Image (cartoon, rainbow, N blue to C red):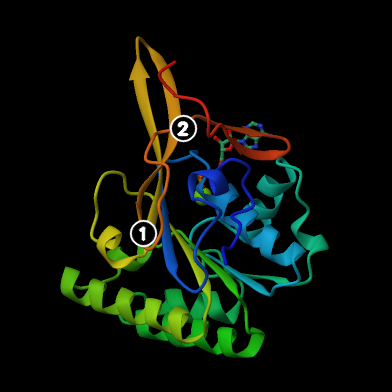
Amino acid sequence: MRASTGVEGLDEMLNGGLIPGRTYLVKGGPGSGKTILSMLFLVEGAKRGENCIYVTLEEPINEVKEDMKNVGVDIDSFDNIHMFDASPSGETLFGNSFFRNLELDIPGFKAALEAKIEELKPTRIVVDPITILELASKSEVEYRRDMMSLFNIFKVHKVTALLTSEKTGVSPEDFLVSGVIEYVEYEIRGRLIRGIRIRKMRGTAFDESIRPYRITSEGIKVFSEENIFE
Ligand SMILES: Nc1ncnc2c1ncn2[C@@H]1O[C@H](COP(=O)(O)OP(=O)(O)O)[C@@H](O)[C@H]1O
Ligand SMILES: [Mg+2]
């Protein structure tokens, strides 16, 4: 049993999709497509009748919704995608309680999220991006411990979780998650070449090549048969 990512070509790279109930990381630079990919993953679940939770820690919800309209998705048409704004501009209780005491309140964030999971019983969840959680941690030890306990909440509730990260290269989270999907970019003779690759995926064979992708008004398409350098 695999959970489709909702992105054409990416499921093929994953040998069918993600293994449900595990936590995955989507990494990449600004504008690479992390938010769109993670929302498409929720839309795919929503279309199958699953409950989904999206938590934004950076971009305001209305902007995320506008961005999704540009790729042909009206998030408001899905009443089973529950959006929570924990961004600095967030108006919700969830957001305010997190940012009021950022230094101490990662446990508060986890508790608020777990309460929502218990209430809504989602099978898919996105936290976009997790970068601020690391900045709010006092040490790497504390960060790793908090992240592991967050992943454990997902596991206990059998949620497939997709977290985004703005870091590129290998970073501590890579070791904690079940899989890492990474956007990469290269400058070759003054031209920017973008690709997507799977850096790690426990429990399955996967395509190890870097593949080209395109964001269009219809979503993200990964060219899983093509080589980015050709
Ligand atoms: N309709 C579209 N056609 C082409 N590119 C698009 C379209 N809609 C959005 N994009 C591209 O998607 C990117 C933003 O994706 P996003 O998921 O918000 O990035 P990230 O979260 O990684 O910063 C931008 O670089 C933008 O150019
Ligand atoms: Mg984003």
User: Which residue occupies the foreground of this view, 129 or 43?
Assistant: 43
Describe residue 82's horizontal placement relative to residue 99 as left or right.
right
Viewer-side label of 2, 1: 2
Describe residue 6's horizontal placement relative to residue 167 as left or right.
right
Q: Please state the horizontal and vertical placement of residue 216, each as a whole percent of the image.
A: 67, 33
Indicate which disc, 2 or 1, sits on the residue closer to the N terminus. Answer: 1
Q: Is residue 105 visible?
A: no
- Three-letter amino acid code at the position of disc 2: Arg
Q: Residue at x 76, y 62 (%)?
A: 47
How crowded pointer 1 is (Cα within 10 Å; few <14, some 14-19, many 20+) is rated as some
Q: Residue at x 49, y 65 (%)?
A: 19
| Residue 107: quadrant of the picture | bottom left
User: Which residue occupies the foreground of this view, 211 or 37?
Assistant: 211
Q: Please state the horizontal and vertical placement of residue 15, each as a whole percent of the image.
A: 51, 50
Element marked by disc 1:
helix
Q: Residue at x 24, y 54 (%)?
A: 171
Q: Which residue is mark 2?
A: 211
| Residue 78: quadrant of the picture | bottom right
Q: Is residue 6 visible?
A: yes
Q: Which residue is mark 1?
A: 131
Describe residue 14's horizontal placement relative to residue 1 as left or right.
left
Q: Please state the horizontal and vertical placement of residue 11, each as a whole percent of the image.
A: 56, 49
- Three-letter amino acid code at the position of disc 1: Thr
Q: Residue at x 29, y 67 (%)?
A: 176
Figure quadrant, ligand 1:
top right
